[in-house]
Amino acid sequence: MKLAFVIQRYGADVLGGSEQLCRLLAERLATQHEVDVLTTCARDYITWKNEYPEGTDRVKGVTVRRFASTRTRELDAFNKYSDWIFNHAHTSQDEMEWLKQQGPWCPALIEHLKRHHQQYDVLVFFTYLYATTVLGLEVNPGRSILVSTAHDEPAIHLGIYKDVFTKPAAIFYLTDAERQFVQQQFPDRPLLEELVGVGIDIPQQQPYPRMPERVDDEAAPTADDGGGETASSETQAAEPGAREFPSHLTSRGAVFRRRHRLHGPFALYGGRIDPGKGCEELLQYFSTYVGEGGDAALVLMGAKLMALPEDPAVRFAGLLSDSERIQALEAASVVVCPSPYESLSLLALEALAVGTPVLVNARSEVLVEHCVRSNGGLWYANRDEFVECLKLLVADPRLRAAMGRNGRDYVRKNYRWDVVLGKFERTFAKVRNAPART
């Protein structure tokens, strides 16, 4: 089949849940299908400035076609307009103006779709929110699939999105919480719906036990006492005669800890460091934790889109490679997911996949669902709950180890790539073979 993936941004250095999901799927499906990604030249979603060169490129077996946007976003003006439109009566023209101000505004991409849509068997649109999806779905809805990444936020209640959830031939959901929300919000939907989830690569466990921070060797959990992740069928025995190293050099996550000079427990956040992702609140809550005697550090990895405090307990790790990211997730005592708006959270799933417990914002139904179903994390609804949950997780290595095992099992059972890709393939075939709409 020939597939077109339509996404607002695309690239290995682009941070964002839907963007990362699109890239992972495109690269895997490109081994069996001809995959085109239709996207903009933007690298960041704040301004939508054209940074990538316009034209066609080949990236890991995927043809990427980039189109220049005709305008950048004026953030202050857009925020003021958003505040007005979310709180006052308005017209459909007002909503289209809001969509245009939000960006990306890329008429060339839509024109390409209009001219070439018939050469694709299936069009897959990622994220309901942007003009690339709202306008693109109008071109050939009978061959279109929406990966909505929907959650309850002010924008989704605008009238322009009713058609977005009505027009496509199929809708893909990433979590059951997302499916329930969409079904309640939009009663008129396609008959073809599928809970596909996302595939998560589960790294091989390292050939050493996870060493609890600041715990004497004698107190470390063993295979017999049900404690931490120790030698098992998934771990490898040391070679006879192999050189022995001190535990601080061989314990899980030691490479990341040495590189960033981390010598005690730490909480980790990864992704866009942005108030919209809950990072401002996270820093405020963490300051209270430190003020009440908490001894863990907070490490933030990703793209910094806001100022960070001058605090020795707060560390910025920057943008990391895929391998370094896994090392960071393994090294962390707990991974914090502070966003109140999530349709999946790859960060949470990646943390669970490596056996690190999560601490998540209770305002996100999706994140709470992961914690409940996996028994691999805790959730907080306010500052006091955040502080107490973080204190508990940092202080109890056996609890972290048990949650870590639960998290790995949850991801292994529910987020295997072979299962996820099979669901995509079956729906692609149904959409391609469906009779044309009249």
Image (tube, rainbow, N blue to C red):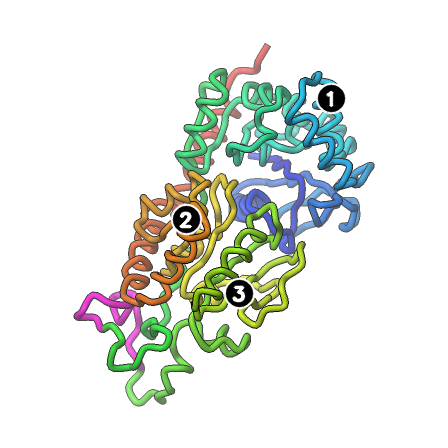
Q: SS class of the residue under badge 3? A: strand
Disc 2 to disc 1, C-alpha distance: 37 Å
- Secondary structure of the residue carrying tag 2 is strand
Residue 204, placed above or below residue 42: below
What range is drawn magenta here? 222-238
Under circle 1, the secondary element is helix
In the rendering, at what x and y percent does residue 400 appear? Answer: 32, 62
First reached walking from the N terminus: tag 1 or tag 3 = 1
Confirm whether residue 2 shows in the render.
no
Query: Disc 1 marks which amino acid?
Result: Asp
Q: Disc 3 marks which residue? A: 299
Q: Residues within 10 Å of mark 2 (few under 14, many from 20)?
A: some
Left or right: 29 as drawn, with respect to 400: right
Q: Amino acid at mark 3?
A: Val
Sooner in the amino-acid sequence: mark 3 or mark 2: 3
Where residue 32 appears, x then y in whole percent?
Answer: 51, 43
Magenta highlight on residue 288:
no
User: Disc number at residue 326?
Assistant: none
In the depicted structure, whether residue 219 falls above or below residue 162? below
- The one nearer the camera, 373 or 311, is 311
Circle 1 packing at 10 Å, graded few (<14), some (14-19), many (20+), is few
Q: CA distance from mark 1 to mark 3?
A: 41 Å
- Quadrant location of the C terminus? top right
Q: Which residue is mark 1?
A: 94
Mark-to-mark CA distance, 3 and 2: 19 Å
Residue at image point 55% right, 19% down: 166
Question: For the residues carrying marks 2 and 1, which lies nearer the camera in this image?
Answer: 2
Q: Which mark is residue 380?
A: 2
Foreground of the two, 322 or 157: 157
Task: Report x, y in % for residue 238.
Answer: 30, 80
Could you tell me the amino acid type at mark 2?
Tyr
Sequence-first disc among 2 and 1: 1
